[in-house]
Amino acid sequence: MPISIHSSHMASEHLERYRDIIPDFDAFLDSMSRPLPVTVRINTLKTSAPELLSRLDRAGVGYERMRWYPLGLRLDVEKPGRLMEFHMGLIHVQEEISMLPPVVLDPLPGERILDLCAAPGGKAAQMSMQMSNRGLIVANDSSSARIVPLRANLERLGAVNTIVTSYDGRRFPEYTFDRALVDAPCSSEGTARRHPGVISRCSVKRSMDLQSLQVSLLRRAIQLTKPGGVVVYSTCTFAPEENEGVVSRVLDLADVESFTVPGLRSSPGLPSWNGNDYGEELVKCRRYYPHENDTGGFFVAKLRRRLSAGE
Amino acid sequence: MSRSSAEGFQPVNKDTVVSMWRERFGISEDVFKGFGFFRRGRMIWAFSLPEIPPFRCESIGMRVISMRESPWKPTTYALQLWGRHARKNVIDLNDEMARRFFAGESLELRAQVERGYVVVTHMGSVIGCGLYTPGKLISQLPRERRILDDQNAPEHHAQPGDTQQDGTE
């Protein structure tokens, strides 16, 4: 999709602030101007990988399996939403890198999981699949407008172990979850390959405004998770203010843990940025840049709630 | 009060629900192991726990049966999830017929099934719910599950993940 000269100029100007932290910056800028591959996730609540792949073979739809995730496919088709397999709920159209946070969280069948900012529900439905429809996922989203697509996706994908709630995540009511996912509202710089206009709305001020919300959401999610439980914090932005800058403000409640995902390239989190010292442990977070895996941009932190959290 | 959680959702007798699936489709009760069933309005919902947790719920689990008609009508989504375990009242369509069924057409066909709601499949994968009367199969797919010709399709065809700018996915 072409971007106007005006917004393209503004885009690269804003992104210049990352020149020193993003490796191979020119390749990064180049990839940001290219459209994303069409990617889908196989929904094992309704099918199996062999069944789905044999359907695609028979329909003559080309695909490539993701190296790091056996249920992820890149499809050689323009409109996956018109495939029978989509309407059967056998696949979900989901950006490749957005399949990552549930993999890092690794929810188990029978556990109780909080998905604090769940709309439109691709990650919640993915967790439902990881849990074989057992246990509980509370898929929450504060926006009533986003509840409609959230419910529709969960229903089409057959996620029986979910309930949908619409609380302000900062004031989510008291409960004890085994794990929590905070896929926070963010400035979404990493989605520019699909929404080219997004960068022109980004600014440091906007990131700082979002940071207060993100810190409140993440702190609440940690408080709602059992001691020793895992909390994953993710965004689809590059702005350190919304990533390491958020995680550094919950280290009184949780510890950062390192993780690796074989087959997926990434860069370490930033221990400091623009004069802010976030702490050495922040290198355990992972940054995913578009040119590293030909995906959108993402940030993922894996946290574990302290056994005795100083709340 | 936390008790307001289950607003409108009343537990229903599991045997009643399970026996409907067994009698109509021959689906074993093992398929429903661990699931609970609740009623709100004229719909029955399936959920993974015997009790609804104490939240103000917009929805729980998924809608599996509509009690608006008699006999009760299984939802397309429930059939997509459990229909592959059906042993009877299943109609498998060829490519051409599956395309027409997805477009919402009624199909002229004769099948070895009982009159009433059937599981409609294509190459063994479930499409959804159909209504069979001898010689005819009528699509019961919800409108948003229909695949129309390009020229008739709405421009913003529901593409999950495309709906948002801020945040996830």
Image (spheres, coloured by chain):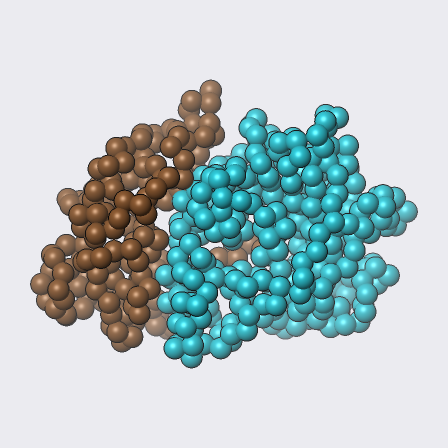
Chain colours: A cyan, B brown
Q: Residue at x 39, y 77 (%)?
A: A59
Tell me: A197 left or right of B58. Answer: right
Q: Quadrant of residue B125?
A: bottom left
Q: Residue at x 79, y 55 (%)?
A: A268
Tell me: A180 left or right of A26. Answer: left
- A171 and A254: which one is in front? A254
- B112 and A19: which one is in front? B112
Residue A308 visible (yes or no) = yes
- A300 and B163: which one is in front? A300
Q: Position of residue A127 (x, y in %)?
A: 52, 49
Q: Residue at x 19, y 57 (%)?
A: B88
Q: Position of residue B37 (x, y in %)?
A: 32, 37
Q: Position of residue A60 (x, y in %)?
A: 42, 79
Tell me: B55 left or right of B164. Answer: left
- Rendered-image quadrant of the C terminus of chain A: top right
Tell me: B19 left or right of A245. Answer: left
Q: Is residue A157 above or below residue B102?
A: above
Q: Residue at x 24, y 70 (%)?
A: B93
- Rendered-image quadrant of the N terminus of chain A: bottom right
- Which residue of the protein is positioned furthest toward the left in this rendering? B134
Q: Is residue A99 above or below residue A55?
A: above
Q: Position of residue A306 (x, y in %)?
A: 72, 32
Total marks placed: 0
Residue A206 visible (yes or no) = no
- Which residue of the protein is positioned furthest toward the top in this rendering? B1
Q: Is residue A302 above or below residue B52?
A: below
